[in-house]
Structures are given as C-alpha cells and as structure tokens.
Image (cartoon, grey):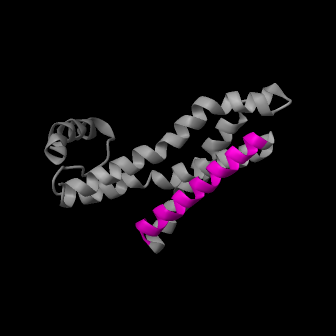
Amino acid sequence: MLTGTRRTVLMLAGCQALSMTGGSIVGLTGAIVGNMLTPDKALSTLPIAVQQAGVMAATIPAALLMARIGRRPGFWLGTAIGGIGAVIATWAIFRSSFEWFCVGTFLLGANRGATQQYRFCRRRDCRRRVSLEGDLTGIGGWRRLGGVWRRSRQVVA
C-alpha cells in the first residue's frame, strides 16, 4: 500500500491523466461530429477551436480562484464544469445541435484549463523527494529535467 508523497503524486498524476483525456477525445472526434452537425462544412473544426478557447479562457481564472478558495474546491469545481460540458456535448449530439455542441466543448476546454493546475500540486508535494525547482527554460532547466527523469523512479518505485 502506498503512503505519503508517493500516493499523492500517483493520485494527482492519475487525476490529471484522466481529466486530460477529454481534450484528446474532442480533438479526435470534434471535427467528425462537427461535420455531421453543421450545415456549413467550413465550420467542422470549430468545436476544436472552441475547446482551445475554453482552455485559454479558464487557465488564469482557475489559478486565481484556486489561490483564493484552495486547490481541492477548485479542482472539484473544474471537474463539475467538465461533467456539465460532457453532458451538454452528448445531449447536443443526440439533438443534432451544433451550437450546443460548441458550448459543451467550450466547457470541456474550461475543465482542461482548471486541471492543468494539477501539475503545480505535484510539484509542491514532491519537491523534497524529487528536485523540480525552477522552470524548464534554458539549458539548465533541461538538465534538471533529466535529473528529475532519473530520480522519478524513486518516487514511483
């Protein structure tokens, strides 16, 4: 049984992986569904663009909200937004509504904007065990990334 930092890091990594699959699903199927729903085939890829707009619109507000109310409530709110977006997108497919499908993909993008904050929790929680200090800009940053890669087996193992 995992305890402490190892469990937290694995849980956060799993949550981020699961939550980011929504973006991949929209990326793979958004244009196909958009092509089926819209009368103007030039708008087929609009759901993918709208999802990216949702990511951009939600990333900074999500970070500010989480700084104010805490990460756990912020993640729950982001998950709720993603769930609502998935329900709306699914409902739109059954109702053949291109506009509502775009609304749903926007909310799925907003969910991705919120769940990008998982990486900062992982960074904070495993800072003592795995050196993740600094960013990845410049040669020194990439050298640190190599060190993290080598030492990450200690966290998981």
Which image quarter holds the N terminus? bottom left
Helix, strand or loop for the magenta stretch, by majority: helix
Query: In percent of the image, x 54 and y 42: which residue is there?
Result: 22
Magenta-drawn segment: 70-94
The answer to which quarter of the image holds residue 93 is: top right
Count of number-bearing discs: 0
Please identify the quadrant where the C terminus is shown. Answer: top left
Q: Is residue 142 above or below residue 119?
A: above
78 w.r.t. 29: above or below: below
Residue 92 included in the magenta stretch of the image: yes
Q: Looking at the image, which residue sits at the far bottom?
A: 69
Residue 5, placed above or below residue 108 = below
Question: In the rendered image, which quarter is residue 80 located in?
Answer: bottom right
Q: Which one is in front, 143 or 130?
A: 130
83 lies left or right of 102: left
Judge left or right: residue 14 versus residue 51.
left
Q: Is residue 42 visible?
A: yes
Viewer-closest of 75 and 53 = 75
Q: Position of residue 71 (x, y in %)?
A: 42, 66
Identity of the residue drawn at 28% across and 59% down: 124
Q: Quadrant of residue 35?
A: top right
- Residue lying farthest right? 39
Q: Is residue 61 left or right of residue 100?
A: left
Q: Residue at x 36, y 51 (%)?
A: 119
Q: Position of residue 95 (x, y in %)?
A: 80, 43
Tell me residue 60's x, y (percent). 53, 58
Residue 90, magenta (yes or no): yes
Q: Can residue 127 be seen?
A: no
